[in-house]
């Protein structure tokens, strides 16, 4: 589990010590700056804003603010088509040889934008095969997308899991949209958590490295973090607290 400077015992938000990982996992994580402490200083990663739609309304989410100091995945100055995105990657790769990872993380949820997301991933795989592919998602559609992610070559996935308690989830999320139906309250929380855990379990069973992000929401998520971390631990490689 990561530590965070917002807590007395923590010093910084960082990744797991590679010494605690198996050689196979450590090798896969080494060149991904979001998964490796040493890789963070040696490699570059790039997020592509190709996925505008979202299927989950988080009460803390604000995707309208964009400035030079606001560079988190959910914020973008513009939306790219898959073709524009791969052109941008080629330009960045030529200018920054340390680029090792290209991911799709927004501005909405990649798996709520299946056509755009997988077209982008396929173009990068075909034109820049040396780059690692990753994806960040809320996990709602993850069980349905595992096979396609494997087919296109994604081997790192980050899932935002803020809680494993459906009652807490009801306070974090206003609604979710699944199979043409809108859900809210505890029911939405139960659906989301079950699908998140199913997706994470299926990915890790196939050898995909999974990192869990959890947003710091005082009074809601902080007390349950030990439970969430333990609940995710059998499958996830890392548990990262997002201090915003």
Image (cartoon, rainbow, N blue to C red):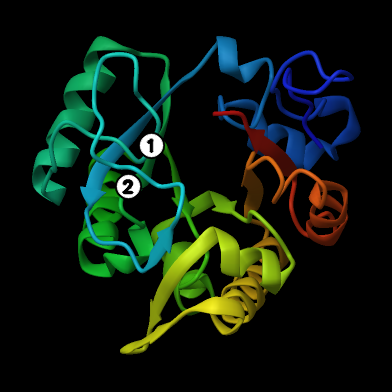
Q: Is residue 185 above or below residue 152?
A: below
Quadrant position of residue 8 = top right
Numbered circle sitting on residue 106: 2
Q: Is mark 2 on a helix, strand or loop?
A: strand
Q: In this view, does 47 lie above or below 9?
A: below
Residue sitting farthest toward the front: 219
Q: Which of marks 2 and 1 is nearer the N terminus?
A: 1
Q: Tell me the number on the disc at residue 201.
A: none
Percent of width and height locating residue 196: 61, 68
Q: Which residue is pictured at 73% across the width and 65% down the height? A: 164
Report whether residue 200 is seen.
no
The residue wearing badge 1 is 73
Image side of residue 64 versus residue 202, left or right: left
Residue 197 point in image, percent of width and height: 68, 70
Tell whether 170 sits left or right of 14.
Answer: left
Quick one: SS at disc 1? loop
Query: At which x and y percent is residue 230?
Result: 88, 55
Q: In which quarter of the image is the N terminus?
A: top right
The vertical placement of 159 against 189, above or below, is above
Residue visible at 82% across and 47% down? 223
Disc 2 to disc 1: CB gap under 8 Å: yes
Q: How many labels does the image show?
A: 2
């Amino acid at each position: 589990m990561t530590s965070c400077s917002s807590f007395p015992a923590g010093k910084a938000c960082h990744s797991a010590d590679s010494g605690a990982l198996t050689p196979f996992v450590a090798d896969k994580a080494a060149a991904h700056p979001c998964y490796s402490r040493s890789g963070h200083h040696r490699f570059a990663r790039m997020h592509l804003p190709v996925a505008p739609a979202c299927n989950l309304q988080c009460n803390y989410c604000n995707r309208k603010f964009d400035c030079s100091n606001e560079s988190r995945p959910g914020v973008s100055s513009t939306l790219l088509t898959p073709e524009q995105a791969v052109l941008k990657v080629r330009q960045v790769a030529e200018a920054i040889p340390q680029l090792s990872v290209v991911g799709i993380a927004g501005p909405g949820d990649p798996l709520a934008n299946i056509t755009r997301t997988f077209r982008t991933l396929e173009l990068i795989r075909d034109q820049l095969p040396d780059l690692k592919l990753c994806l960040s998602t809320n996990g709602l559609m993850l069980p349905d997308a595992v096979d396609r992610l494997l087919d296109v070559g994604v081997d790192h996935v980050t899932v935002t899991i803020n809680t494993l308690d459906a009652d807490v989830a009801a306070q974090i999320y206003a609604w979710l949209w699944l199979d043409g139906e809108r859900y809210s309250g505890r029911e939405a929380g139960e659906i989301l958590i079950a699908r998140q855990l199913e997706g994470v379990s299926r990915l890790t069973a196939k050898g995909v490295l999974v990192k869990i992000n959890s947003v710091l929401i005082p009074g809601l998520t902080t007390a349950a973090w030990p439970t969430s971390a333990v609940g995710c631990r059998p499958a996830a490689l890392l548990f990262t607290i997002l201090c915003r």
